[in-house]
Image (tube, grey):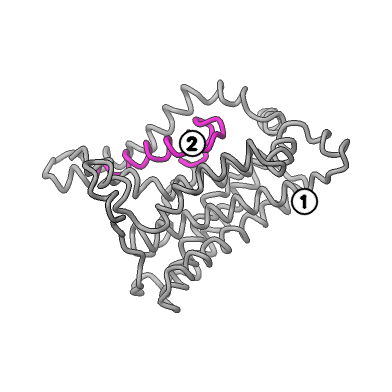
Amino acid sequence: MLLQVLTGAVRGGTCILYAGLGETVSERGGVVNLGIEGSMLCGALAAYAVTAETGSPWAGALAGAVAGALLAAVHAFFVISRRSNQLATGLVVLFLGLGITSLFGAAYVKAEINAFEPWAVPGLSSIPWIGQIFFDQDPLTYLSYVLVPALWWFIFRSRWGVLLRAAGERSEVLTTYGHRLVPIRYAAVIAGGFLAGIGGAQLSIAYANAWFENMVQGRGFIAVAVVIFAARQPFWVAAGSYLFGAALALSPVLQANGYSINQFALDAIPYVLTLVVLVLLGRRRAADAPEELQKVFEASVR
């Protein structure tokens, strides 16, 4: 059972990981995007629809990424160009994504697709426990293994990462050195939506292999909580995503092994865990947030 839960933690936590990494990029640039769940929804539908039409899950994954980026661009326009409240706009964008996917997704509820299949890495997959947990997964999960260290290097070791962090920490520094704040923040928010769209694609065409209305079911909000818990550090985002993935995997594993536990109680575990993390760490992590994000939170409280 433990092996099943840990394997499910990686499979089920990967979509949260992509969304969490996307939100990390956005927040490092000084923009909170609560509409990240909407980007996941659009990514899930676009990936499923394109895969159904073309037969190529790779084309579907790319379409999901683009759909997530497009919805994030809506959020970017209102909060960066029109200076609307970031938290309120994020919720509006989420409902926009929910409405769009509900409208256009009805035709694909029963569609059949050629989904991503788990692929065992030769040699590595035969390692006891580690091989079964990490190296018998779908291609998008393997891609996330590379993305985590790559994003860490980008944020903390590259020149572009310095500009990104400056946009979130001290935006006036960018202006002083001749850089424009607006394009950097647009790029951060849209890139975050792009990654969240891949997370939605992984959910629909690699994990669930299905599309149904509102299938993300709060995973985007869990990703935001993971980013707070992880203090916007990619490796900690990965660890937190797998933790919440394990909570999501617990219910089906217990059912498959014949344990009769209240289904509603099991389904509530990931969201209760989210609340506990926010209560225990939320205030402390908010104080550690980039300076521009602290302004957002303070403005919302007022």
Which quadrant is the N terminus positioned in?
top left
Task: Tell me which amino acid carries mark 2.
Answer: Phe
What span is in magenta? 222-251
Task: Tell me which amino acid carries mark 1.
Answer: Pro
Picture quadrant of residue 151 = top right
Which mark, residue 138? none
Q: Secondary structure at mark 1?
A: helix
Which quadrant is the C terminus positioned in?
top right
Provide residue 152's location: percent of width, then percent of height: 56, 39
Distance of label 1 from label 2 (alpha carbons): 27 Å
Q: Considering only vertical position in the picture, is 226 above or below 100?
A: above
Q: Within 10 Å of the Cα at label 2, are there few (<14), some (14-19), or many (20+) other Cα atoms?
A: some
Q: Considering only vertical position in the picture, is 52 above or below 47?
A: below
Provide residue 28's location: percent of width, then percent of height: 65, 38
Residue at (32% x, 54% y) in the render: 137
Residue assigned mark 1: 183
The answer to whether residue 67 is left or right of residue 295 is: left
Dot placed on the residue nearer the N-terminal end, 1 or 2: 1
Q: Is residue 261 magenta?
A: no
Q: Secondary structure at mark 2?
A: helix
Q: Considering only vertical position in the picture, is 159 above or below 112?
A: above
Q: Considering only vertical position in the picture, is 130 above or below 58?
A: above
Residue assigned mark 2: 235
Residue at (74% x, 47% y) in the render: 184
Q: Is residue 228 magenta?
A: yes
Q: Within 10 Å of the Cα at label 1, are there few (<14), some (14-19), or many (20+) other Cα atoms?
A: few
Q: Main secondary structure of the magenta part?
A: helix
